[in-house]
């Protein structure tokens, strides 16, 4: 039961298409060792997710999509998690790649709980190269932002703690920011704009609750 | 005082617009549920002083603060 992972990854606009594609990249590595329930696209709706949570009680949740302080959304901005059903995500390890949701929903999820919530207190943002928007995994610009966030799940799956996963992700962001800084010094167009956004993700990423929580 | 604040606000907008202006035209910024925007769309939002424009200004100011306080460099110097 401990090796179950629940994933939500709606895709109905540029932002969610990218998040879904990069989530898919991590999931490919999990197929052999973990049982993944992947609510993708139109399947990423509250009814499906709640039913699975109640029936199977997965320990790790990887949530991709839009969000705000109190909510995480699924397909076409349908609410999946809010303060109304936050009880369902207590005592779990959650990585929410969604804007702002660590501010209130995340804090509530770990209150009186042994769980952990990794997420963002700022909007999770990234630049994309429009020439690559139909093939997100070939977009080297977006990869600078999305690889470090994928690292969180990869590290959790390797058996590292939530704190270690966060640290590895930060190391990758620092490495990418150094690259961008060096590009900026060579006056490469766009480097400062990208650095600015990656800094926002770095500063906005938080680990709430039990930092020593382990999945594997 | 009010005039000074308004002037500062216009200066900040101008700075943000200048920085956005140098982004390659094929780049788009995804800002969560607010959407994905080209640099010209972002500039128009900043000029319009709307929610998206204000978000872009906020992100820029946060970065400038990290630069001027030395927090960014301190972070980048971590682990060598």
Image (spheres, coloured by chain):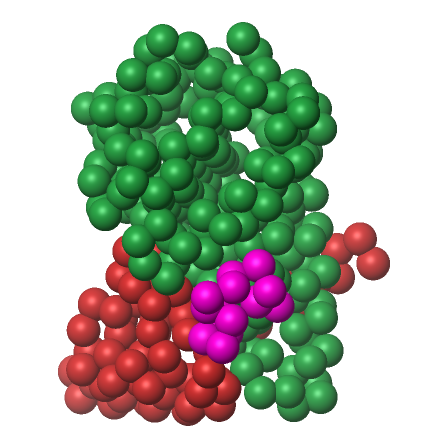
Q: Left or right: where does residue B20 sit relative to residue A170?
A: left
Asked whether residue A142 is in view, the answer is yes
Does A68 appear in magenta?
no
Q: Residue furthest right?
A: B80
Residue nearest the viewer, comparing A116 with B6: A116
What residue is drawn where x is 45% and y is 31%? A38
- The percent position of residue A7, horizontal first and vertical second, equals 45, 32
Up/down of A14 relative to A163, above or below: below
Task: Check the picture and name the quadrant holding the C terminus of chain A.
Answer: top right
Q: Residue, x 46% and y 25% (percent of image)?
A: A37
Q: Which residues are magenta?
A: A127-140
Q: Position of residue B1 (x, y in %)?
A: 19, 83
In this view, B4 is above or below A24: below
User: Which residue is nearer to you in this view: A133 or A208?
Assistant: A133
In the rendered view, does A79 fall on the left or right side of A9? left
Chain assigned red? B
Q: Residue at x 27, y 88 (%)?
A: B10
Chain drawn in green = A
Q: Looking at the rendering, in which quadrant would you find the N terminus of chain A?
A: top right
Q: Please provide percent x and percent y for residue A150.
A: 59, 45
Which image quarter: residue A3? top right
Q: Is residue B65 visible?
A: no
Q: Nearer the viewer, residue A162 or B33?
A: B33
């Amino acid at each position: 039961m401990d090796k179950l992972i629940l994933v939500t990854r709606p895709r109905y606009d540029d932002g969610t298409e990218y998040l879904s594609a990069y989530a898919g990249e991590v999931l490919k590595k999990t197929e052999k060792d973990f049982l993944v329930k992947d609510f993708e696209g139109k399947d990423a709706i509250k009814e499906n997710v709640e039913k699975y949570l109640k029936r199977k009680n997965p320990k790790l949740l990887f949530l991709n999509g839009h969000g705000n302080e109190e909510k995480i959304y699924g397909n076409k901005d349908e609410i999946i998690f809010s303060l109304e059903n936050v009880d369902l995500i207590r005592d779990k390890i959650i990585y929410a790649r969604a804007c702002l949701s660590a501010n209130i929903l995340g804090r509530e999820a770990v209150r009186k709980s042994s769980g952990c919530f990794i997420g963002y207190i700022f909007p999770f943002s990234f630049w994309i190269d429009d020439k690559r928007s139909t093939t997100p995994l070939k977009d080297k610009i977006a990869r600078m932002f999305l690889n470090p966030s994928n690292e969180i799940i990869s590290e959790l799956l390797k058996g590292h703690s939530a704190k270690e996963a966060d640290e590895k992700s930060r190391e990758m962001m620092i490495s990418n920011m150094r690259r961008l800084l060096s590009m900026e010094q060579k006056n490469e167009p766009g480097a400062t704009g990208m650095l600015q956004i990656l800094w926002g993700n770095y500063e906005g990423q938080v680990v709430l609750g039990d930092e020593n929580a382990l999945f594997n | 005082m009010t005039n000074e604040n308004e002037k500062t606000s216009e200066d900040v907008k101008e700075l943000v617009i200048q920085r956005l202006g140098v982004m390659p035209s094929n780049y788009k910024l995804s800002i969560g549920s607010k959407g994905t925007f080209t640099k010209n769309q972002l500039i128009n939002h900043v000029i319009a002083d709307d929610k998206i424009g204000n978000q872009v200004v906020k992100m820029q100011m946060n970065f400038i603060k990290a630069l001027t306080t030395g927090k960014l460099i301190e972070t980048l110097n971590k682990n060598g």
